[in-house]
Image (cartoon, rainbow, N blue to C red):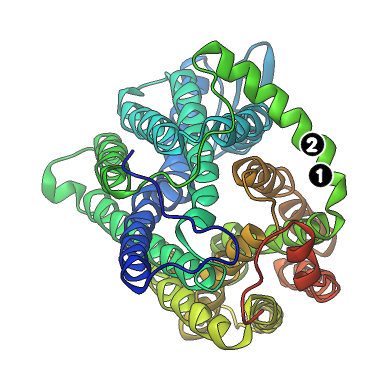
């Protein structure tokens, strides 16, 4: 990596010319950093949200049909079983189990990855390794054909792990390239840029998929092309931050090769022992894990609500997915501007209040009313990106310097581990009441509880407790 950032000693001011040069270089790093949000967001928007579930479920169903089973519907959950490693489960549940298996693997991989990154400070190399591994596995999903869904399982787990591990490293770079007063704005711009990039990648893939007949492609071939284009998008745009970002912290150890692995283990154990010394940081993390579960649940069940409860056609649901991506771009930028005036904590609390109102409004959307559904989707888009962007920047203020990647690994693992609670609540309430309307409104609990817990965290005291400088507005 290129030369390190100039770090003045405490109480010593940089000369005006040096300070101006450093500010300019920091701005360049920030612009380069935002490009990884653009690059990596193609994976969740195109693969996780749309084509991964669609395609792998279909291939698993083909395997069940080839084995002589009767699969009465496309995504049958009954009488259409597949098996892996001695476990039998419905083909229609494959993708849900796949996400759970990927999360279990990340519990092992992410903390160690974070510790090694903090220990060695080779963050650019580690980010590149996981990003290109994930992008390559995504493109190789094009090899999954016929009944070979097991190959798809391995490649998807590899791709998803690459995405989550690279995100940990990416998040941990934020404190190195932005001052305490800059982080909310930089994180919001990155998140906004990610929604714009993910939306454009999804639009490109949907154009290929929906226009497959005009292109002379089968449905399977069109989806496999989408896998390749998503992988190429992810890999190609990752080159921008890798080539322009600099290193700014010295390594904490001198280990290389396998010794870096053992050094990472030691560092991780030390961090876990010391985490109890920062209860306010853990308090904010607990609040975040609750309300982010509500956010991810709304995003994942919105299509189901529109389809099964409101009876909207698939074309409306697909256009809504795209619209939310671009509205979220605007919403993230707006959250950054509001946070600059009112601070991250108050802006997050305001955003959670808006989430409560939007979910309550979703309860009253009339069946087959497209305009009302679009209006609720716009509301979701306005708060979707900004809440997460400011949570990322605020958490970066609450972790000890030099331990950012380790703490962000816990942040990501917790985010994934708790993501099943919301869908379980949504499904249980829907099954008990026979309607998804009370199920959708039950998700308000995540935002109310999150609001209360965030309000109880004295963030300035939490920042001082970990030894970080306080932003002017918080």
Q: Position of 131 compared to 110: left or right?
A: left
Query: How many labels, in total?
Result: 2
The residue drawn where x is 71% and y is 66% is 436
Q: Position of 442 compared to 263: left or right?
A: right
Q: Quadrant of residue 235?
A: top left
Q: Position of residue 473 (x, y in %)?
A: 63, 82
Q: Are the two marked residues, 1 and 2, in contact with CB atoms closer than 8 angstroms?
A: yes
Q: Is residue 229 above or below residue 88?
A: below
Dot 2 falls on a residue whose secondary structure is helix
Residue 319 vs residue 158, the one in the foreground = 158
- For residue 272, the mark is 2
Q: Residues within 10 Å of mark 2 (few under 14, many from 20)?
A: some
Q: Is residue 134 in view from this perspective?
A: yes
Which quadrant, please, contains the C terminus? bottom right
Q: Position of residue 252 (x, y in %)?
A: 59, 33
Q: Quadrant of residue 308?
A: bottom right
Q: Position of residue 180 (x, y in %)?
A: 57, 68
Q: Position of residue 2 (x, y in %)?
A: 31, 42
Q: Position of 119 compared to 216: left or right?
A: right
The residue drawn where x is 84% and y is 36% is 273
Q: Is residue 19 above or below residue 2?
A: below
- For residue 275, the mark is 1
Q: Is residue 236 above or below residue 199?
A: above
Q: Position of 25 compared to 336: left or right?
A: left
The residue drawn where x is 47% and y is 80% is 374
Which quadrant, please, contains the N terminus? top left
Residue placed furthest toward the bottom: 341
């Amino acid at each position: 990596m290129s030369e390190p950032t100039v770090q003045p000693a405490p109480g010593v001011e940089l000369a005006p010319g040096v300070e101006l040069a450093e500010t300019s270089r920091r701005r360049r790093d920030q612009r380069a950093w935002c490009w990884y949000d653009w690059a990596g967001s193609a994976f969740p928007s195109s693969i996780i949200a749309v084509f991964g579930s669609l395609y792998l479920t279909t291939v698993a169903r083909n395997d069940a049909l080839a084995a002589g089973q009767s699969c009465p519907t496309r995504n049958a959950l009954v009488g259409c079983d597949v098996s892996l490693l001695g476990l039998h489960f419905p083909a229609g549940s494959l993708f849900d189990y796949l996400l759970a298996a990927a999360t279990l693997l990340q519990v092992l991989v992410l903390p160690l990855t974070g510790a090694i990154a903090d220990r060695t400070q080779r963050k650019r190399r580690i980010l590149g390794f996981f990003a290109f591994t994930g992008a390559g596995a995504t493109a190789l999903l094009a090899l999954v054909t016929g009944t070979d869904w097991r190959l798809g399982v391995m490649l998807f787990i590899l791709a998803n792990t690459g995405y989550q591990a690279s995100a940990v490293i990416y998040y941990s770079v934020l404190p190195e390239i932005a001052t305490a007063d800059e982080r909310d704005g930089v994180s919001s711009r990155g998140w906004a840029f990610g929604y714009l990039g993910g939306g454009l990648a999804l639009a490109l893939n949907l154009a290929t998929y929906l226009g497959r007949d005009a292109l002379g492609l089968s449905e399977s071939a069109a989806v496999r092309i989408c896998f390749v284009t998503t992988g190429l998008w992810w890999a190609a745009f990752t080159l921008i931050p890798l080539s322009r970002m600099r290193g700014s912290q010295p390594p904490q150890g001198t280990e290389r090769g396998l010794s870096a692995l053992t050094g990472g283990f030691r560092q991780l154990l030390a961090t876990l022992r010391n985490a109890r010394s920062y209860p306010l940081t853990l308090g904010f993390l607990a609040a975040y894990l609750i309300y982010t579960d509500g956010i991810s649940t709304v995003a994942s069940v919105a299509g189901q609500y529109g389809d099964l409860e409101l009876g909207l056609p698939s074309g409306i649901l697909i256009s809504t997915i795209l619209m939310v991506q671009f509205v979220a771009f605007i919403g993230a930028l707006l959250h950054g501007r509001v946070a600059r005036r009112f601070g991250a904590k108050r802006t997050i609390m305001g955003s959670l209040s808006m989430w409560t109102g939007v979910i309550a409004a979703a309860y009253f959307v009339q069946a087959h009313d497209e305009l009302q559904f679009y209006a609720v989707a716009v509301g979701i888009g306005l708060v979707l990106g900004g809440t997460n962007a400011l949570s990322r920047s605020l958490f970066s203020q609450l972790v000890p310097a030099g331990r950012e990647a380790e703490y962000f690994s816990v942040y990501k693992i917790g985010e994934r581990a708790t993501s099943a609670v919301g869908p379980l609540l949504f499904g249980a309430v829907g099954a008990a009441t026979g309607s998804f309307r009370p199920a959708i409104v039950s998700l308000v609990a995540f935002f109310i509880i999150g609001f209360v817990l965030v309000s109880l965290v004295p963030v300035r005291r939490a920042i001082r407790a970990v030894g970080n400088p306080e932003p002017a507005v918080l």
